[in-house]
């Protein structure tokens, strides 16, 4: 059973992550608190009542491929069409294309709840939303007129076709090719693998976004173009025509997200699939990154959504399951395991990590929104850099936390957690892909260290750290004894972040790139943990006007996280500074020979 935490979501949006900044802008003048609450509540209702009941069914059914067609799980098509009838697909899309024009922050909140309902369900529409964003920014007016409104409505779904058998995360190795036609279209040839929702029965047409190379393209990523390739060709009147030369060759048997078809796609078996250029020739990577950057935040939200579902699942089990006698329990019979200190520890860790993931993902969405409403170049640069800084943290830390929280959920269930019928294992199986796709978390760490830290000569990261310090100072100045050692532990983690940042920037300036790369993954975790602790503390500080129980809960959550989990940053900082030599000395190839 899943209940959307609508009150916590709304509070985090408004009081922790800056929704009020957007509400003060004329673009969102009509977005009052009542409307925000109504949207969050209805998204939560749909997730809990329409999507969540199908999650276990989809896990068992999968997405069988027969006679060249993929069948989605029972109830999937009905739920999807109810979802698009509710207007959810176009929540943040441009109103000129039929969207609602709402902030990314609200889209992130809704996406969290849909992923809690079923990660397998939510990932399909997520890619369609990404295709919409790419088309809004890069497609020609002619392509927009033919395809955009039906993608915004959800009548058609979109995909992202990057990966090939020889090219995982290395886009330099792409071999799919495109040839020019005299009429301005292109013929597409090649194989793509791991294509989420590459084929299905939810919509009458599927619009593939495909990376391929032209014959005269420059080598490497500078020679990649992006093409729109529909499953069915579309006439000038909008009617569906002949089947395009694209087919699904197989569906992967995966560890998790069984309700999401992961397909191998073949283009050009019969003369070439017809495609249309998005943007400019050899500039496809810039277009695809429009999809990928927001998809990375969306994957972070997947980690958050699964974490919330796994936490609720474990909490309900811990309250119902009775075993042993908890310390101080004077009642008759055995105690609910929720009263045992070790179970409390795990539940508190699950809850705090889930809330950290929520706050970081919403903060990232806030930065993206602020970029779009900034009224001068300085503001746009600042918020674009802030969104760039937060995106790899949101993606990597939230998905790591999704796995960690789901694993604790299995542990709380004990032996029953290892039995599929309880459902605890599914959350762990589903969550495990999120640190891998849309750029592995190692790649996110490299992006953070090598590309984002040097932004504006280090001014962005230093300003970010100063903001964290201001929150720690506010905690200390509050003189609230219930915060315990929160301020001290938060300040200690921020010092660790400062020292680790100095090391990373110095290593790059001195050309010690291998040293920086060796510590990139622990660096991202230090940054994410410090930010998470600060945002939890901020939530507790902003809860003084909330009911006493809410104030106590948020203060306890911040204190627990800062006094326990934040202790990791000292060891991680040492890892960053001291481990490079040992890492670089390790010869895996010699051991494997």
Image: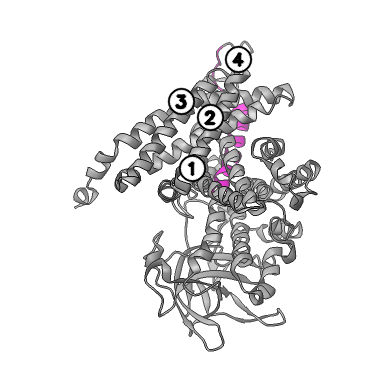
Q: Which of marks 3 and 4 is in front?
A: 3
Which numbered marker is on residue 459? 1
Query: Where is mark 2, residue-wise?
Result: 469
- Percent x, y of residue 294: 57, 54
- Total number of numbered labels? 4
Which quarter of the picture shows residue 17? top right
- Counting residues from the N terminus, which is met first, the one under dot 1 or under dot 2? 1
500 or 567: nearer the eye? 500
Where disc 2 sits, the SS reads: helix
Where disc 4 sits, the SS reads: helix
| Mark 1 Cα-neighbour bin, 10 Å: few <14, some 14–19, many ≥20 | few
Is-magenta flag for residue 425?
no
- Percent x, y of residue 193: 45, 65
Which quarter of the picture shows residue 503? top left
Cα gap from disc 3 to disc 2, whole angstroms: 10 Å
Query: Where is mark 3, residue-wise?
Result: 492
Cα gap from disc 3 to disc 4, whole angstroms: 19 Å
86 or 13: nearer the eye? 13
Which numbered marker is on residue 481? 4
- Counting residues from the N terminus, which is met first, the one under dot 4 or under dot 1? 1
* Magenta highlight range: 300-327
Q: Nearer the viewer, mark 3 or mark 1?
A: 1
Q: Quadrant of the N terminus?
A: top right
Where disc 3 sits, the SS reads: helix
């Amino acid at each position: 059973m899943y209940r959307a935490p609508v009150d916590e979501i709304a509070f985090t949006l408004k009081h922790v992550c800056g929704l009020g900044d957007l509400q003060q802008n004329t673009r969102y003048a009509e977005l009052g608190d009542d409307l925000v609450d109504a949207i969050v509540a209805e998204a939560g209702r749909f997730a809990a009542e329409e999507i969540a009941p199908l999650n276990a069914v989809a896990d068992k059914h999968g997405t069988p491929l027969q006679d060249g067609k993929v069948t989605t799980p029972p109830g999937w098509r009905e739920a999807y069409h109810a979802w698009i009838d509710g207007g959810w697909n176009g929540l943040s899309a441009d109103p000129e294309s039929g969207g609602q024009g709402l902030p990314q922050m609200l889209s992130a909140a809704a996406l969290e709840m849909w992923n809690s309902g079923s990660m397998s369900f939510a990932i399909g529409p997520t890619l369609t939303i990404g295709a919409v964003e790419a088309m809004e920014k890069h497609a020609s007016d002619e392509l927009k007129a033919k395809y955009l409104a039906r993608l915004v409505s959800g009548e058609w779904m979109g995909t992202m076709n990057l990966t090939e058998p020889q090219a995982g995360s290395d886009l330099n190795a792409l071999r799919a090719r495109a040839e020019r036609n005299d009429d301005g279209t292109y013929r597409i040839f090649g194989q793509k693998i791991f294509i989420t929702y590459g084929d299905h029965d939810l919509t009458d047409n599927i619009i593939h976004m495909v990376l391929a190379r032209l014959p005269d393209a420059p080598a490497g990523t500078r020679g990649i173009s992006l093409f729109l390739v529909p499953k069915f060709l579309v006439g000038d009147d909008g009617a569906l025509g002949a089947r395009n030369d694209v087919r699904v060759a197989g569906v992967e048997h995966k560890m998790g997200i069984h309700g999401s078809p992961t397909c191998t796609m073949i283009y050009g078996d019969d003369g070439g699939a017809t495609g249309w250029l998005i943007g400019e020739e050899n500039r496809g990577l810039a277009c695809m990154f429009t999809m990928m950057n927001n998809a990375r935040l969306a994957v972070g939200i997947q980690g958050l959504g699964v974490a919330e579902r796994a936490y609720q699942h474990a909490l309900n089990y811990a309250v119902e399951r009775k075993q042993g006698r908890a310390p101080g329990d004077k009642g008759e019979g055995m105690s609910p395991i929720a009263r045992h200190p070790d179970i409390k520890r795990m539940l508190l860790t699950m809850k705090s990590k889930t809330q950290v993931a929520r706050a970081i993902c919403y903060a990232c969405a806030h930065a993206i929104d602020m970029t779009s409403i900034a009224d001068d170049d300085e503001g746009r640069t600042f918020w674009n850099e802030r969104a760039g800084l937060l995106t790899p943290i949101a993606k990597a830390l939230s998905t790591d936390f999704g796995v960690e929280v789901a694993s604790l959920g299995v542990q709380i269930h004990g032996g029953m957690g290892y039995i599929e019928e309880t459902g605890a294992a599914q959350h762990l199986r589903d969550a495990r892909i999120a640190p891998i796709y849309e750029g592995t978390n190692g790649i996110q760490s490299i992006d953070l260290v090598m590309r984002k830290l040097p932004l504006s000569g280090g001014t962005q990261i230093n300003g970010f750290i100063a903001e964290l310090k201001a929150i720690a100072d506010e905690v200390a100045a509050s003189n609230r004894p219930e915060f315990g050692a929160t301020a001290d532990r938060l300040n200690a983690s921020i010092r660790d972040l400062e020292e680790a940042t100095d090391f990373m920037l110095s290593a790059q300036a001195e050309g010690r790139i291998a040293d920086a790369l060796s510590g990139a993954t622990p660096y991202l975790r230090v940054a994410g943990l410090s930010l998470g602790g600060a945002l939890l503390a901020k939530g507790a500080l902003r809860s003084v006007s909330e009911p006493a129980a809410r104030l106590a809960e948020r203060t306890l959550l911040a204190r627990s996280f800062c006094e326990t989990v934040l202790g990791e940053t000292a060891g991680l900082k040492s890892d960053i500074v001291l481990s490079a030599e040992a890492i670089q000395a390790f010869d895996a190839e010699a051991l494997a020979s």
